Amino acid sequence: MAVKAHALDKIVSLCKRRGFIFQSSEIYGGFGAVYDYGPLGIALKNNISQLWWRYMTQLHENIVGLDSGILMHPKIWEASGHVAEFHDPLVDCKQCKARYKADELTDKDPKSVDWSTMQCPKCGTTGKMTDPRQFNLMFKTQIGPVENEGSIAYLRPETAQGIYVNYLLVQGSQRLKVPFGIAQIGKAFRNEIVARNFIFRTREFEQLEMQYFVKPGTDDDEMKVWKKERFNFYTDGLGINKDKIRFHQHGDGELAHYAKEAWDVEYEFPFGWSEIEGIHNRKDFDIKRHQEFSGKNMQYSDQVTNEKYFPYIIETSAGLNRMLLTVLADAYWEDTENNRTVLKLHPRLAPIKAVICPLVKKDGLPELARKVVDNLKNHFKVLYDQQGSIGKRYYRQDEAGTPFGITVDHQSLEDNTVTLRHRDSQKQDRVLITGLIDKIDEAILNYS
Ligand code: ATP
């Protein structure tokens, strides 16, 4: 049974202890809502993003990749609506100084709420809430040595716009026909005011975005297809528990200015159900606006029928941090029977696939264990460990999510077999050293 009480604190401390995630600039007292990824964190993050990339660009022949710049022409953010619309309404409690995003406290349009009757969830005082103030979430920077109106640039708050402004170049160069998709993984930046829940909401984060260009009229059906695809990615791809994933549809009050229909994929985190991914029907809003603001023709031209039109766009947009937190929260398991903490990561995602341990540090066992490492390291990320008792070595790796433990013992010197231990069940098989790669591959494939 996964333990949920205070589970987030426990995950945070495991992440630090095992080298997954550290608070940024810790020796300076930390830097709000920014995190650094340690050796296991970056390995896990890479495994997740590579899986997403494979799902998108390898399993779909009509989806291709792109890597656009973080800095872009500032007019792009006028066209997209971010300069005018990308605001969070904030309210403060005058009593205890707590700050909230208005939508944390109400489902209604913040303008329609009488804030003087609102109670502060932190200190419980009523009548001390300020009216909402609008706060733009884009980070501004400056290009060149002189700071003036013309030198302003923004750190992109989403990767999507880089796809829209390039879509005809991508389409033409790859000879793509609607429907087709463009996928991108890259950093985005938001000056989040209220940042909490570990890596759930950070000021810089990677987005995994795929924009799917479709013929208007087919958009509603494509939306259904993508909802299913994305659900399967979480359950079959990342191995997340089906009961902890659900959809939430945006009602009229929640819909973004560009959206015709929007769904959040939500996960039941220790702090409650929260969004990990948005699936949006953005219509032709963005590319029409880029035509208006750039003066360039942004229509798609169908070479067969000679039709020209603005495609509709179905967007799937996820944050890599949030996916990572989902994977960690779902995998965290306190095995009280055996007094150990385990990250039950899907072996496909595990940062280290196997730890290789000589039973003792003598009798030629370390040398043979090193040979096993050399055999395996072309196929899997493996680790050699001879420190401490075998039980301790395994428990360390259980916390790191390492699915397989291999022990070289005295019998290995005689018959070239080793023990292969499975993390979740702790069962052990005796396996020929030459058969290890196949055995591990098979166990990864059949993991459930
Ligand atoms: P939220 O309502 O949580 O602020 P959003 O609706 O603004 O999110 P989108 O603009 O739709 O989010 O962004 C798409 C995805 O990008 C989100 O589902 C989330 O996974 C990720 N994301 C957005 N903001 C952040 C953030 N500050 N930190 C981490 N991930 C984020």
Image: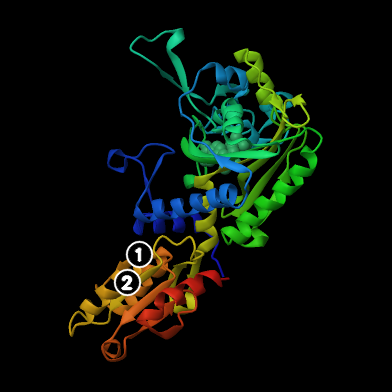
Name the residue located 62 percent from the left edge and 55 percent from the top edge.
233
Do callouts 2 and 1 mark residues in contact (Cβ within 8 Å)? yes
What amino acid is labelled 2 in the image? Asn
Residue 409: tell me if it is visible.
yes
The picture places residue 275, in percent across and down from the top left corner, at 62, 45
- Residue named by callout 2: 375
- Residue named by callout 1: 378
Dot 2 lies on which element? helix
Quadrant location of the C terminus in the rendered image:
bottom right
Dot 1 lies on which element? loop
Q: Residues within 10 Å of mark 2 (few under 14, many from 20)?
A: some
- Residue occupying the far right of the picture: 217
- The image quarter containing residue 285 is top right
Instruction: Please say if 120 is above or below 82.
Output: below
Q: Residues within 10 Å of mark 1 (few under 14, many from 20)?
A: few
- The image quarter containing residue 150 is top left
What amino acid is labelled 1 in the image? Asn
Q: Whole-Å distance between the Cαs marked 2 and 1? A: 7 Å
